Amino acid sequence: MARRLVLLALIVASAAVLFILQRHHITAPVTPRPLLYLVADAERSAGRVPLSLTRVSDQEESQIGEELSRNICREPRVSTPPSAYRPPLALGSIQQREDARIRAYLNEVGQRVAQHVERRAISYHFCFDDNAYLVNAYAIPGGYIVVGRGLLELLESEDELAAILGHEITHVDRRHAIERMQYKIASQKAGVGSLYQLGAPAQWLYEAGYTKDQELEADRNGLDLAVAAGYSPLGGINVMQHFEKMEQAQRDRTAGSPITEFAGIPLQSIQEYFRSHPPAYERLAAMQAEIRSRGWALSPVRPYALRAIFLVQAAHVLDMQGKFDESIAKYQEALRLEPDNVAASDGLASVEWRTGDAAAAEKAALQASPQMPTLQNIRILARSGAVANPDDAAATLSKIADQRTPDRLAMSQLARVELAGLIPGNFSYGPADYRKVIEEVSTSPAWESTLRAEMAWWMYRGEKLKEAAAELEAARQKYPQSGETAYWKAWVDSDLGHQADAQQDLIARDRAFQSPVPGDALAALRAVILWRSGDLADAKTDFAQAARADPAWMVPKWVENNFSHSSSLTIEKLIAAESARRAGINGRP
C-alpha cells in the first residue's frame, strides 16, 4: 500500500509542476509523454506491485496485444517525396513495393530469431512504422514488435537487425511488456489508472522504456536469441556502437556543435531514445562481457537487404539540402548494391540534372532506360538530351515509344511527346505524331492536359511563347482542375510581358483542384513576376524563400536548362541578389 501511495504522490506532484509551468507560459510544449516517463520511473523506484495478483495468461496477453496493436501495426501510408516543377518523383507504387519488402524482411528475420523463445504459446508479429524520426523499436504484449524507419536507416547488417529484434522479443518473452500492462491494472485499483490514458497512443507506454535491469537482460538474452538463430554477435556490438555515436551526436548538438551523420534526425528523437534506455557504453560493455563468457566467435555479419532502400532515401534528403555530391555518391552506392533499383536510377538522373550537368543526367537516364523507364526518367532523358546529346536521347526514347503494350502505354505516349519536342520535324516522331497521341488520349482529360502541358514546356523553352500559350489554354479547357497548367501559363505570360495576367494565372493555380507544384517553385515564379514588375524588394524576399526550400534555384546552369532564355536572365539577377545577401550575413564584403 505504501508503494502505491508513493506512486500516486509522485504523479500528483508531476501534474502540479505541469500546471505551474503552463500558468507561467513556458514555451516548451507540455505533453503527456513526460508524465508517462514519470510513471515509468515511479514504477522503477517504487518497486513492483505483486504481479501474482494481476497475472494474465498467454492467451489473455495475446488478446491484449491484438487490441493494442490494432492501429499501430496497420499498413504504412505512402508518403510522396517533395516534387518541384521539374518532373515529380513517380515513386508511389515503388514505395509501396519497398514498404512490402521491409515488412517481409522484418518478418523473415524476426521469425528466425523468435524460434528460440521460452514461451511458445505467443505468436510474434513484426510491424513497420514508416516514420523516419522514430529511431526506436518497442514491444507490445502478445508478441507485437514495432520497428521505426529511423532505426532501420542506421543499420548496416542483417545481424544488427537480428540483435534489435531479439532485444524486443525478450521484452515479450520475459514478460516485461505484459508486466507494464499489469502495473496499469494495478494502478487502476489504486485510483490513478486514468493518468495512463491522457489521450496518448498506447505505444507511448512502451516507448517509455523498462528498468535498467530489464533493458540489460533484453540485451543479453536478445543477443542469445540472435546467435542461436545463426547470427554473429558482432551485430549486437555494432548496434551499440551506432548508439554510442548517437549519444555523442546528442551531446554535440546540445552544445551547438555541427554534426552531419545524424543531421536529419530531430534532437528530440535521439533524446527520447536515450531517455528510455541505459547509456550505450554500459550496454556495450555488458554485451562484450557476455560474448566473452559464452565463448562466442565474432563471425562475419550478413549483408543488409534493406540498405539500398535507405541509401536512396538518404540520397533524396541530401539532394533537397543541396548536398549534391553526397547525394550522387549514395545513389551510386545503392545502384552498386541493386543495379535494378528504379528509385535509385531515377534519383541519380534527377540529382545530376539538378546540378546542371546535362551530360551526366543523360548518361544516368540512359542507363535506366528502356529496361525500366518511369515517367520521370523519360522526361529527364529528353530534357538532358536536348542540352547534351539529342541523338542518343532520341534513339532511346524511340525504343520506349514503340512499347505500346497496355502496361507501358502511358510511358510510350509520353516518350512520343518528348520526341516531338526534342527534335521537332527532324525525327520519325514529330508534331504530326504528337497530334496522334493527343487523339489517342482524348478520352482521358487529365492525361491529355498533362501531355499538352509537356509539349507547351518545349515551346516555352524554345521561345515559342504564343504557341505555348495556345497549347496551355487547350490543356486548361480540357482539364481546368490542373494547377500545373496554370503554373506554366504564368511563366509564359510573364515572358510575354503580361505580368498582371501572370498574377491571375497564379490565382487560378491556387484555386485548382490538383496543384502538384511545390512552394519553392511558386515562390520563384512570384519573384520573377515581382522583379519584372519593379517590386525588387519583395522579389528578393520570395526568391530567398525559394532558394531556402530548394538549393537548385541557386544553380545557374540548372536554371538555364529548365527555363526560357528570358526567364533565365531574370533568375540569374535574383541569384546574384541572394548571393550578395548571404555574403553579407556571413560577414564577407
Image (tube, grey):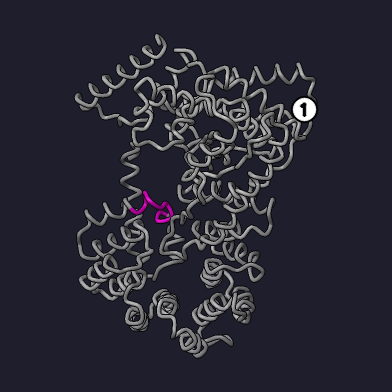
Left/right placement of residue 394 relative to residue 441 reads right
Q: Nearer the viewer, residue 395 or 121?
A: 121
Residue 232's quadrant in the figure? Answer: top right
Hey, what amino acid is under mark 1? Leu
Report if residue 256 lies within the magenta region: no
Is residue 207 positioned above or below 396 on the image? above
Is residue 201 positioned above or below 91 on the image? above
Residue at horizontal 66 percent and vertical 35 percent from the top: 121
Q: Where residue 6 appears, x then y in whole percent?
A: 37, 12
Q: Where residue 553 appears, x then y in whole percent?
A: 40, 56
Left/right placement of residue 571 relative to residue 353 reads left
Q: Tell me how many marks there are.
A: 1
Is residue 526 positioned above or below 452 on the image? above
Residue at horizontal 75 percent and vertical 35 percent from the top: 229
Placement of the C terminus among the 4 image quadrants: top left
Q: Where residue 349 appears, x then y in whole percent?
A: 56, 60
Residue 491's quadrant in the figure? Answer: bottom left
Mark 1, Cα crowd under 10 Å, few <14 / some 14-19 / many 20+, is few
Residue 204's quadrant in the figure? Answer: top left
Tell me the residue that label 1 is attached to.
298
Q: Main secondary structure of the magenta part?
A: helix
Which residue is farthest top? Answer: 2
> Magenta span covers which residues?
546-554
Left/right placement of residue 450 relative to residue 29 reads right
Residue at horizontal 63 percent and vertical 24 percent from the top: 219
At numbered mark 1, what does the secondary structure look like: helix, strand or loop?
loop
Left/right placement of residue 500 relative to residue 569 reads left
Q: Where residue 545 appears, x then y in whole percent?
A: 32, 51
Report if residue 552 lies within the magenta region: yes
